[in-house]
Amino acid sequence: MRSGIFAAVFYVASFVLAGGLAYRIRLYAKTPAALRIPTTPAPTTHAGVAVRLAGEVVLFQSLFKANKWTWAFGWVFHAAMLATLVQHLRYFLQPVPWPVVLEQPIGVLAGFPMAAGLFALWGRRFVVERIRYITGPSDHLMLALLVAITVSGLAMKYLAHTDIVALKTFFLGLMRLRVEPLPGDPVLLVHLSLVATLMVVFPFSKLLHAPGVFFSPSRNQPDDTRERRFVSRSALLKPASKA
Amino acid sequence: MAAVTGFDPKAEVHGDPIEIPTLACGAMANSKPFAAGPAHQAALGFPGELVEDWHDKAIFRLGELLENSRALRVYLDSCVKCGACTDKCHYFLGTGDPKNMPVARQDLLRKVYRRHFTWAGKVVPWLVGAEDLTKDVLADWYSYFHQCSQCRRCSVFCPYGIDTAEISMAARDIMDTIGMGQKYSNEIIGKVFSVGNNLGLPPKALKATLAGLEDEIEEETGVPVKLPLDVKGADVLLVTPSADFFASPHMEGLIGYAKVFHEAGVSWTLSTYASEAANFGMFVGSQENMKKVALRIRKAAQDLGVKRLVFGECGHAWRVAYSFLDTLAGPFDFLDPAYPVPQHICEFTNDLIEAGKLRFDKAANDSFRLTFHDSCNVARASRMGDAPGGQFEIPRAVLRATCNHFFDMAPETTREKTFCCGGGGGLLTDELMDVRAKGAQPRMRALQEVAEEHGVTHMAAICAICKAQFSKVLPMYGFDREAIVSVHQMVSNAILLTGSRQAEEYDARRKSAG
């Protein structure tokens, strides 16, 4: 019963995450960029744009310019989350690839800086007047969700161990369309439920910033109007339709 | 003119330009521009007054914009409310009104987007800050989307590059579409369509003005420098903001361009049909109107049979020219491919300086201790020269070549981090003087710093709006009204025209000095 429910939940969550993201990304891709609007100074070539985008995605360059504290908290959280995700690959891959094996000692500790980063980011939403003003219920809930996932994960690693071998069997089974038994300890079930929630929420929320950054015209366009004519597919250049 | 309320510029001029104010909720809620009348609206193809089914029309228009602007779609989805932009807008720094924080300004549109175009906003609006478009929300739009000068400073700091300018353009477009236009911008666009320039200066008056300037230059230098108008077959068509024909220090800049063209021996002309570089179609977010204005420049260039296109000192005009013109009105394959289309007058002058073709007596500018105000649209939405950042280096190179005393303002207020003058984006109108004065505060503080540190007396700019705005706000902050100068005014002061009195005197001085 329990195994069946969670199997269904994860199939649905995976479908919503993948389908929702694919829909959104397709929408971004097919919506025409009306004009050349890179924030200048901008690279003049597509290779330069790739470097600029990499700087944004890997180092959060613009955020670094904006606010060192927000940058530090945000970067630590995202980097630690990445390390944790890489570490979690071992529960889905058999045999475990060597980079994941190598990363394991970092990965199991990354939950701590991840939680610290989240709490710091959350704290700003209470302490800094300007950030408090722009914070809505969903911003708190999103942080609560991420904190709960992180803390429940850490609890399983360092307080109440779960049967990780059985868990891996469960997920490997799902990937082969077989429902294997899922361990029943409550912390694990909470952890898994929250992760499924995050997967479902992702394509409908501000988590869309992840694909969004790649489609942001002020960052992903080269400054090349002088070198190449930019032809717009936007219908806005034509007389407006009468609604 | 609207009063500047509860704000004493002279007391505010000292301090850190980027000092963060405490929040003053609703402080600027009453700031709003005059509404465009039915005639001004009609000229642009917009309804004359708020249409009956304004709500549905507004939502429909937002849908159209979303389908045709990747920027709008991505920017409305991507914000995580990280707060990076919250202290970056000059209007927030000057007013403390939280709705002038870029993210909060965006949210005025985003909450309506969420309500009508996202699943979460339809199902759980209270959770994700989704709201219906009500008359109150519309009033907020009219007020706060006319407290954005579309300067893009926030977009520099946003981790996703969200550009509030795109959002305020979209909001203004929607408001125009339902009959809520802004008088200042829409009246001006109408004048371009009917007369050819923002000021509504008719060809006869333009001709007389130029003749007057020719006399002035000849009197000053003894050289018959011409300001040609509608000359077919000239090499260069100069398109410049109409303020250059009329206002000060703009006109001094125009004299500078004329002297440079004369000394370079390049034949050039102005056009009555395209006697305006500015394109307020951008400010109101109407790509259709922006295109119509841009096409006038193409027609003028074709009719006059010129080989090159050069733009005078104007910030947003240079954005439209550099970034959009080819898309809106191109291809310009009838022009000489040996030159960039278009070229900025600063590039033109700097090329001549680098080639050693211009001579200057820098001492002629010794009464000016100069700094340079990077105009927002030039800094963050365009380029000069071949390399990124040329838009910062080339105007400075021109100033350094013509002046002995140049000092930059604080780095957090210059180049890509420059502050808007406070009057850009269609806000340069008297009834908005309150927000204009407050929005100028960061720049005025940065100027005060270099005035104290380096004895800076003047600030040069390459934007007609900056020049007009600073002429108004400098005295409020205790500076001289004439402390704002054109870059080509400095060129004009120092240039040694061949055969001029100034050149003779300079050479005589050099000779006697041995």
Image (tube, coloured by chain):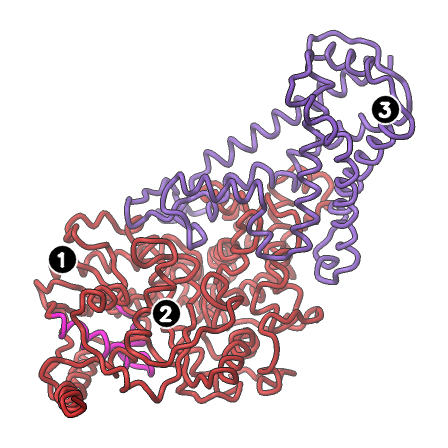
Chain colours: A purple, B red
Q: Chain of mark 2?
A: B
In the rendered image, which residue does mark 2 sit on?
A: B188
**Quadrant of the image containing the N terminus of chain A:** top right
Q: Amino acid at mark 2?
A: Ile
Res. B293 visible in picture: yes
Q: Chain of mark 3?
A: A
Q: Are marks 1 and 2 in contact (CB under 8 Å)?
A: no
Q: Secondary structure at mark 3?
A: helix
Q: Which segment did they paint magenta? A: B240-264
Quarter of the rendering containing residue B400:
bottom left
Q: Nearer the viewer, residue B203 or A126?
A: A126
* Residue on which the image places disc 1: B307
Q: From the viewer's perspective, is residue B510 above or below residue B438?
A: below
Identity, as a three-letter code, of the amino acid under mark 1? Lys
Q: Which residue is mark 3?
A: A189
Quick check: do tags 1 and 3 share a chain?
no
Question: Residue B273 lies in magenta, yes or no?
Answer: no
Magenta-colored segment: predominant secondary structure:
helix
Label 1 marks a residue whose chain is B
Q: Amino acid at mark 3?
A: Leu
For label 2, the SS is helix
